[in-house]
């Protein structure tokens, strides 16, 4: 931890918590006036590329995305705890960046949500999911980042929570309102599955 004169505090939980030190000169998290900004996290040890536990996973039993998501979300929650906040109470916005290569029309996030439920319970705040061609380290499939607020308050959720993703369309925390990304999926319908499997051009 390193607090600056301007009240900014950079936080890195350390290797003992399983969070690797980033290659670039940045902090995995920054605290500022009650706000907690968690930097994008990927499944890399920043030394050999993919983290060893990710390389050793049996992808015949679980998809690459699920294996990497578990590593990413574990490191994220360890970083958040080092900031002194609870992601299940204080998270107000989350972004997911899956790698789609050259086929942005066919990103399948159905393997991600069950892993997400291992770390975060209840309603997930406002969220965005956007495919990218590649990430910082070769072979990584997912980057996740988020914002938390440490103010003693509670989230209010608005709109129909998506039964498949668990995300709320809008989250209010005090005077702040955070909106989820919007797409063409008919999410209020229980049988709808477009959030997972519809081609982007159709949406």
Image (cartoon, rainbow, N blue to C red):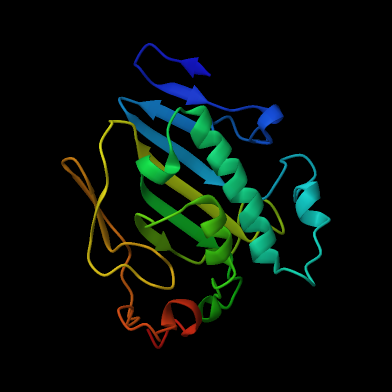
Whether residue 42 is visible to the viewer of this picture, yes or no, is no
Task: Return the x and y of residue 149 as percentages of the image width and height.
Answer: 33, 36
Task: Return the x and y of residue 91 as percentages of the image width and height.
Answer: 38, 44
Task: Return the x and y of residue 38 as percentages of the image width and height.
Answer: 47, 39
State which quarter of the image contains the C terminus. bottom left
**Residue under the image location 70 percent in, 69 percent down:** 63
**Residue under the image location 70 percent in, 29 percent down:** 15
Going by the image, does 156 lie left or right of 70? left
Whether residue 40 is visible to the viewer of this picture, yes or no, is yes
Residue furthest to the left? 175
Instruction: Tell me if residue 198 comes above or below residue 154 in the rendering.
Output: below
Task: Return the x and y of residue 174 as percentages of the image width and height.
Answer: 18, 40
Going by the image, does 20 lie left or right of 147? right
Q: Which of 199 and 152 is in front in this view?
A: 152
Residue furthest to the top? 5
Instruction: Tell me if residue 163 comes above or below residue 170 in the rendering.
Output: below
């Amino acid at each position: 931890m390193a607090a600056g004169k301007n009240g900014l505090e950079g936080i890195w939980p350390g290797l003992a918590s399983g969070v690797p030190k980033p290659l670039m000169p940045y902090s995995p998290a920054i605290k500022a006036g009650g706000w907690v900004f968690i930097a994008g996290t990927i499944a890399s040890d920043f030394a050999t590329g993919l983290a060893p536990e990710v390389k050793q996973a049996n992808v015949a039993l679980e998809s690459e995305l699920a294996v990497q998501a578990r590593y990413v979300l574990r490191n994220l929650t360890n970083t958040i705890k080092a900031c002194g906040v609870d992601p299940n109470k204080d998270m107000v916005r989350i972004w997911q960046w899956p790698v789609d290569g050259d086929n942005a029309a066919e990103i399948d996030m159905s393997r991600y949500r069950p892993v997400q439920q291992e770390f975060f319970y209840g309603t997930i705040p406002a969220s965005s999911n956007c495919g990218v061609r590649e990430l910082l380290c070769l072979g990584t499939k997912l980057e996740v980042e988020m914002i938390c607020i440490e103010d003693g308050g509670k989230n209010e959720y608005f709109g129909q929570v998506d039964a498949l993703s668990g995300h709320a369309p809008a989250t209010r925390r005090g005077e702040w309102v955070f909106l989820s990304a919007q797409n063409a999926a008919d999410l209020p319908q229980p049988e709808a599955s477009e959030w997972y499997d519809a081609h982007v051009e159709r949406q």
